[in-house]
């Protein structure tokens, strides 16, 4: 396709071609999704097979007491012993999304950018947990710092440049051939043409093969080193790792909803505990209520729902008495030292601090939200 075509023509041809290709593949793979779902008994979880995302995913699952066990590191299938019915399949992230849509996988962990690009807003794909706290990046438009772009700092300014015409559109190199054109269309931009590229897109403007790039950015260092800059309004998507599930699988296949619930509970409990500490101290007082009153007078000592106050018993003159009370609170890392200072100020001593591993709620809000979305 000529890069001299207008955005409208480019978008129409690319979309039609892409759709026809995927539809043909989908018809071959999922002629009858319901029958495919019933062909197996195990629940299947797709995980990234390579790279930083793969390593971080395995580390997160390990921290949630869901360690993945591979008999052979070259095999693509593994187990999580804590969930006997769960079968793990290592796949490329894009294939995880496609196989969730086709019914070959029931659950998957991928980046939100991958889900949106390859899932194409498929209503069957449900984001069960949208913030797994790793893989942070953004899909962003970047232009050169020099030449005709030197004084361009926003998407609005870029769109108003007189250089872009139907015969000479703004050329954007990207690997996101769905999200890129969709973003441009949603923003109402004219005279934009996309070219497909994989890797080292930062070189395209300098080589003259593109005017701008649309790519994933984390720190932004690579852009700066290649004399490129992001612009205001040019962020297409903020992304991180997410847990995704197939709606059909959760509704139609036995065990999938229960497995999803257990994974969600473990993930929520661990992620909520990150950066939280248990603080324990002894405090002299006349009663638990009097001690609690002193503790709650300090703004950093309220804990999750309030302090736990319990008597510390000792034997004096042959009698069991409770002159001290133990205070237990949960404190975020950033408020840790301030909390210790406040405890000391109201008579706390023997302060003990230990990191939290899990915080289980009575019921995770994400589970209630999932059930609501499924109509259950």
Image: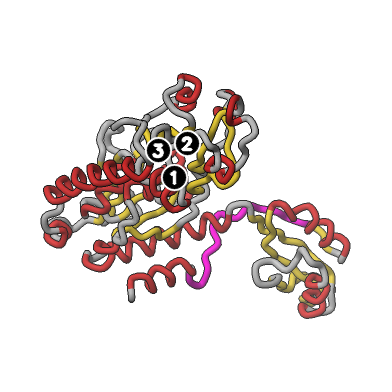
Tell me, yes or no, if residue 239 can be seen here.
no
Disc 2 residue crowd, few under 14, some 14–19, many 20+, Cα 10 Å: some
Q: Which residue is mark 1?
A: 190
Colour style of the rendered protein structure: secondary structure
Residue at horizontal 60 percent and vertical 44 percent from the top: 232
- The answer to whether residue 244 is above or below residue 135 is below
Q: Is residue 354 magenta?
A: yes
Q: Which residue is mark 3?
A: 166
Which callout, 1 or 3, points to the residue nearer the camera?
3
Classed neighbour count for the residue bearing mark 3: other residues with Cα under 10 Å, few (<14), some (14–19), many (≥20) = some
Disc sitting over residue 200 in the figure = none
Which residue extends farthest top? 207
Image coordinates for residue 311, horizontal then vertical, percent: 73, 73
How many discs appear? Answer: 3
Q: Where residue 263 appears, x then y in whole percent?
A: 39, 58
- Expressed as whole percent of the image width and height from the top left, the position of residue 207 reads 46, 19
Q: Secondary structure at mark 2?
A: loop
Task: Report the front residue among 238 and 3.
Answer: 3
The answer to whether the residue labelled 2 contacts the one labelled 1, judged by CB atoms less than 8 Å apart, is yes
Boundaries of the magenta span: 351-363
How far is disc 1 from disc 3 in space, using C-alphas?
8 Å
Q: Of residues 148 and 53, which is closer to you in this image?
A: 148
Residue 164's label in the rendered image is 2
- Above or below 278: residue 134: above
N-terminal label among 2 and 1: 2
For this view, does 251 lie left or right of residue 25?
Answer: right
Which of the two residues, 7 or 313, is positioned nearer the viewer here?
Answer: 7
Residue 71 percent location from the top left of the image = 27, 37
User: How would you rate the neighbour count of disc 1 (Cα within 10 Å): few for under 14, some for 14-19, many for 20 or more?
Assistant: some
């Amino acid at each position: 396709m000529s890069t001299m075509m207008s955005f409208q023509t480019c978008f129409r041809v690319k979309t039609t071609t892409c759709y026809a290709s995927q539809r043909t593949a989908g018809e071959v793979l999922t002629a009858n999704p319901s029958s495919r779902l019933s062909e197996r008994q195990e629940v299947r979880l797709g995980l990234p097979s390579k790279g930083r995302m793969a390593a971080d995913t395995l580390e997160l699952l390990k921290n949630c007491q869901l360690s993945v066990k591979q008999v052979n590191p070259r095999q693509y299938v593994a187990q999580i012993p804590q969930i006997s019915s769960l079968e793990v399949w290592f796949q490329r992230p894009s294939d995880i999304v496609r196989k969730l849509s086709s019914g070959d996988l029931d659950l998957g962990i991928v980046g939100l950018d991958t889900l949106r690009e390859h899932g194409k807003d498929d209503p069957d794909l449900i984001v069960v947990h949208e913030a797994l706290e790793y893989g942070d990046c953004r899909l962003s438009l970047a232009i050169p710092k020099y030449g005709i772009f030197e004084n361009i700092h926003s998407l609005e300014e870029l769109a108003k440049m007189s250089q872009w015409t139907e015969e000479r559109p703004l050329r954007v190199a990207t690997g996101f051939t769905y999200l890129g054109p969709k973003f441009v269309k949603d923003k109402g931009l004219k005279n934009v043409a996309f070219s497909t590229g994989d890797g080292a897109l930062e070189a395209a403007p300098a080589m003259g093969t593109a005017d701008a790039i649309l790519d994933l950015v984390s720190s932004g260092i690579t852009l700066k080193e290649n004399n490129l800059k992001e612009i205001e309004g040019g962020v297409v998507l903020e992304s991180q790792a997410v847990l995704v599930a197939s709606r059909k699988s959760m509704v139609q296949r036995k065990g999938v909803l229960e497995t999803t619930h257990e994974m969600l509970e473990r993930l929520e409990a661990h992620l909520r505990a990150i950066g939280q500490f248990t603080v324990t101290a002894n405090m002299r007082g006349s009663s638990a209520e009097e001690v609690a009153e002193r503790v709650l007078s300090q703004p950093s000592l309220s804990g999750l729902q309030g302090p736990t106050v319990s008597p510390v018993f000792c034997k004096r003159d042959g009698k069991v008495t409770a002159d001290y009370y133990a205070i237990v609170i949960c404190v975020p890392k950033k408020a840790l030292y301030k909390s210790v200072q406040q405890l000391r100020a109201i008579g706390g001593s023997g302060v003990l601090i230990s990191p939290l591993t899990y915080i289980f709620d009575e019921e995770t809000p994400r589970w209630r939200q999932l059930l609501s979305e499924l109509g259950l």
